Image (cartoon, helix red, strand yellow):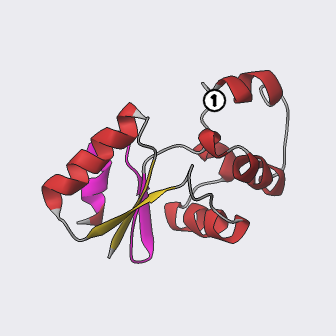
Amino acid sequence: MITIYHNTRCKKSRAGLQYLQSKTDDFKIVEYLKNPLSEAELKDLLMRLNKKPQEMVRTQETVYKQNFKGKNFTDEEWVKIMIENPKLIKRPIVVKGSKAVWGDPAEEIEKLF
């Protein structure tokens, strides 16, 4: 089963979902702004992505610019910041088995097939 962590209001996330739909109908959608990730879930996703927390932070978001830009945080602190501010998590994230990809551009999802 494939899972896509999706934000319906995000153009890149919608493009990722559309790409996934063109490949399969065997997936589930997690709208992580409506159903926030737990700390354990986010850490698991980061491990599957093989990314550090800061690599998955959306730096163009207003909340980032106002509160976090130019400051140094540990990986643990970034995880907590992302849990408290889920808009900061880059999307879409697509998971299949033990692997995950950040679907930007959407063609990155192809790596799971």
Seen from the viewer's position, the closer of residues 58 and 9 is 9
Asked which secondary structure carries label 1, the reply is loop
From the top left corner, tell me how far across and down residue 55 is, in percent. Answer: 61, 44
Q: Quadrant of the N terminus?
A: bottom left
In the displayed structure image, the side of residue 95 where residue 108 appears, left or right: left
Q: Is residue 21 left or right of residue 108?
A: left
Quarter placement of the C terminus:
bottom left
Q: Which residues are drawn in magenta?
A: 93-111
Which image quadrant for residue 38? bottom right
Up-down: is 31 above or below 38? above
Specify the amino acid type for callout 1: Thr
- Asked if residue 3 lies left or right of residue 109, the reply is right
Q: Can you give x and y, in whole percent of width and height, for residue 12 in the image?
A: 37, 36
- 96 over 92 or under it: above or below: below
Which image quadrant is residue 50 in? Answer: bottom right
Q: Residue at x 42, y 69 (%)?
A: 99
Circle 1 sits on which residue?
A: 59
Asked if residue 78 lies in the magenta stretch, the reply is no
Q: Is residue 70 visible?
A: no
